[in-house]
Image (cartoon, rainbow, N blue to C red):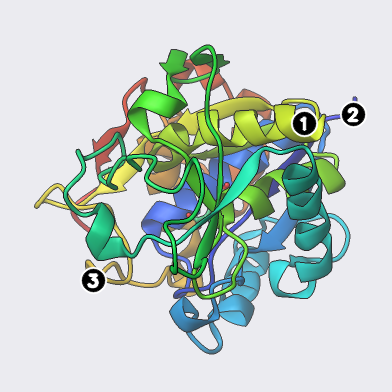
């Protein structure tokens, strides 16, 4: 079985219920078929990183029994590789420099994930006297379709719904959308199982895979845990770190959230073996958002 799954946390804080759900779903989907499960630390965006969070996440996963294969890949060490991919896109004529500031784009319509749709200002060339800030990829063509194993049929017209998107940011960092595509390819990832907040990024990633000649992995986007105010659980919305001294209850709640309720009388140490043997992705609720249990 040549299944390769991955968990790719951003080290902006320790693992909380929301990120545990994504990690657990991806681990179970891989381990249920005897696949590999690898870990990638998405630490490109240094200003957003919380010191110590990457190590805390690794310790928490280990303590929960979510073991991974091989060394952890750190995005911050792979800049050369991302630049090579960017160069290929540039050489293929798929990119262009963009001088627009955030403020200049602020008047255009809001796109699918709440960001402004790029109006194409610099598509035909930089306005005279304006320096390039970012690099964008040209979007065009047929809408992108894919079948998500949880969310079902998905379709997005990237040009209309997102616009030409940034692959190198104004601060010089390579954008998440490009890094994730290069990493998934280099790591031989066959199956991406992650939170449904990223379902709207998937078409952009498929577009980049096609441009770079990479195969498309299978996708499964599991519901994102939201608090009583309907906000995604995160450090900013006050989600607490998973207490690994209470691994059993945390795993049991995450399993219930994923539509895989374990038997009541199962000892904590048997939760993962049970879940691995009984994992049914068809039972995962087909919704993008789901209320987190009150205790989280
Ligand atoms: N690093 C992203 C996050 O923590 C996940 C990226 C991915 O799974 O593709 O939200």
Horizontal and vertical percent for residue 252? 43, 46
Q: Residue 76: where, in percent of width, then height? A: 70, 74
Q: Are marks 3 and 1 in contact (CB under 8 Å)?
A: no
Label whose residue precedes the other's in the sequence (2 or 1): 2
Q: CA distance from mark 2 to mark 1?
A: 8 Å
Task: Answer yes or no: is residue 196 visible.
Answer: yes
Q: Is mark 3 within 8 Å of ligand 1?
A: no
Which residue is rendered at x = 70% and y = 60% of the image?
Answer: 40
Q: Residues within 10 Å of mark 2 (few under 14, many from 20)?
A: few
Please name whichever residue, 111 or 41, is drawn nearer the observer in this view of the structure. 111
Q: Assess whether mark 1 and mark 2 are in contact (beta carbons under 8 angstroms).
A: yes
Give above or below for 230 relative to 260: below
Q: Which residue is mark 3?
A: 238
What number is the disc on residue 287?
none
Q: Does residue 195 appear to the left or right of 291 in the view shown? A: right
Which residue in the structure is indicated by mark 1? 190
Q: In this orientation, does residue 263 appear? A: no
- Dot 1, how many residues are within 10 Å of its Cα: few (below 14), some (14-19), or many (20+)? many
260 vs 37, nearest the viewer: 37
Comparing marks 2 and 1, which lies closer to the viewer? Answer: 1
Q: What is the secondary structure assignment of the residue under circle 2?
A: loop
The quadrant of the picture occupied by the N terminus is top right
Residue 2 got which mark? 2
* Residue 251 vertical placement versus 28 (above, below): below
Position of the C terminus, as image quadrant, is bottom left
User: Of callouts 3 and 1, which one flags the residue occurring earlier in the amino acid sequence?
Assistant: 1
Which residue appears farthest toward the left when viewing the image?
A: 229
């Amino acid at each position: 079985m040549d299944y390769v799954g991955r968990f790719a946390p951003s080290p902006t804080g320790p693992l909380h219920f929301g990120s545990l759900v994504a990690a657990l779903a991806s681990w179970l989907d891989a381990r249920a078929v005897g696949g590999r499960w690898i870990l990638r630390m998405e630490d490109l965006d240094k200003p957003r990183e919380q010191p110590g969070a990457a190590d805390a996440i690794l310790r928490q996963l280990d303590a929960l029994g979510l073991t991974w294969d091989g060394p952890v890949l750190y995005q911050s060490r792979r800049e050369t590789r991302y630049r090579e991919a960017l160069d290929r896109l540039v050489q293929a004529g798929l990119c262009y420099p963009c001088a627009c500031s955030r403020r200049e784009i602020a008047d255009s319509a809001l796109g699918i994930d709440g960001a402004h749709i790029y109006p194409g200002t610099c598509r035909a060339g930089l306005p005279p006297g304006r320096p390039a800030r970012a690099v964008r990829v040209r979007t065009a063509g047929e809408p992108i379709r894919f079948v998500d194993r949880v969310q079902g049929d998905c379709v997005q017209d990237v040009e209309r719904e997102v616009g030409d998107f940034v692959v190198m940011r104004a601060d010089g960092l390579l954008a998440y959308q490009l890094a994730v595509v290069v990493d998934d390819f280099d790591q031989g990832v066959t199956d991406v199982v992650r939170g449904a907040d990223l379902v709207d990024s998937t078409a952009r990633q498929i577009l980049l895979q096609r441009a770079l000649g990479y195969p498309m992995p299978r996708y499964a986007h599991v519901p994102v845990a939201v608090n009583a105010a309907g906000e995604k659980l995160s450090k900013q919305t006050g989600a607490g770190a998973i207490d690994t001294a209470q691994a059993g209850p945390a795993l049991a709640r995450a399993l219930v959230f994923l539509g895989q309720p374990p038997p009541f009388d199962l000892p904590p140490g048997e939760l993962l073996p049970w879940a691995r043997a009984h994992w049914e992705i068809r039972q995962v609720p087909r919704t993008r958002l789901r209320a987190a249990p009150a205790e989280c």
